[in-house]
Image: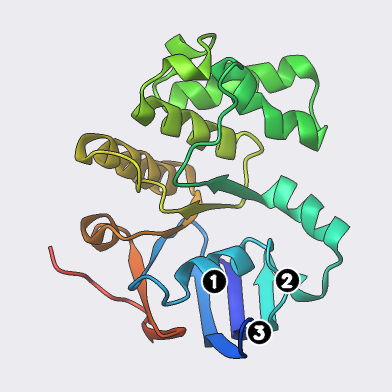
Amino acid sequence: METILKTTNINKYFYDPVKFQVLNNISFDVKKGEFLTLVGKSGCGKSTLLYILSTMDTDYDGELIIDNENVSRYKQDQLAALRNHKIGFVFQFHYLLAEFSCLKNVMIPALRLGKYSQKEIEERAYQKLKILGLEDQALKPASKLSGGQQQRVAIARALINDPLIIMGDEPTGNLDSKNTQIVFDIFKDLTQNYGQTIIAVTHDNDFAAASDRTIQMQDGQIISLDFKGEH
């Protein structure tokens, strides 16, 4: 299996109010098409780690390799280009523009990337909404959808540029159990049938236990690279 992302000895400190090590020698790799979850108590460093993996936080020591490139030495404009091309984001809150249609919301990252024509982007957006069972909602304003549907639109938006990796920060944190299951099934389908790589931070033990692999963190360290939580 091809390695898509690899970290070597990542250390990170916070300096306010005093120097504090928040990540301690984090080393692991992620294979293509893997559905990986990061778990651990609040404050264990998992969200901090996700922001480093997604290249949004560059203030750390150690190496981050994405798609065989050492991105820890990249400049900000190189990182912005990398994120646009290779990383899709799904957050706990969907961050959709309420007055825009679902279709327009999904199109935004592709318009920013500027790789395809407007017509192609629209077709791609429809295609992603179809994968998520939402093509019939495409022209509705995002504000008219249910919370679960809005999160699925946010996933379609994350998929629009065919990213190498989707990063999720508590992607089901705001959803009830029924919608959590729907999002989980979508993630599973994306990894198994589309070869999509997914790295998600979660507090949901069932969600984590059913993913391909779970990295458990405690006090800024990895304590297990293949943790299976309690069902």
The residue positioned 37% from the left and 41% from the top of the image is 189
Under circle 1, the secondary element is helix
Q: Amino acid at mark 1?
A: Leu
Q: Of the numbered discs in the image, which one, if any, rests on residue 58?
A: 2
The residue positioned 42% from the left and 74% from the top of the image is 43
Q: Amino acid at mark 3?
A: Tyr
Return the x and y of residue 88 as percentages of the image width and height: 60, 46
Kindly identify which residue carries mark 3: 15
Tell me the quarter of the picture where residue 119 sits: top right
Q: Looking at this rendering, what residue extends furthest in the left direction?
A: 231
The answer for how far apart the CA atoms under marks 1 and 2 are is 11 Å
The answer for how far apart the CA atoms under marks 2 and 3 are is 15 Å
> Disc 1 or disc 3, which is closer to the eye?
3
Q: Which of the colour schemes (rainbow, by chain, secondary structure, one colour) is used?
A: rainbow
Mark 2 or mark 3, earlier in chain: 3
Q: Amino acid at mark 2?
A: Thr
Residue 1 appearing in the image: no
Kindly identify which residue carries mark 1: 49
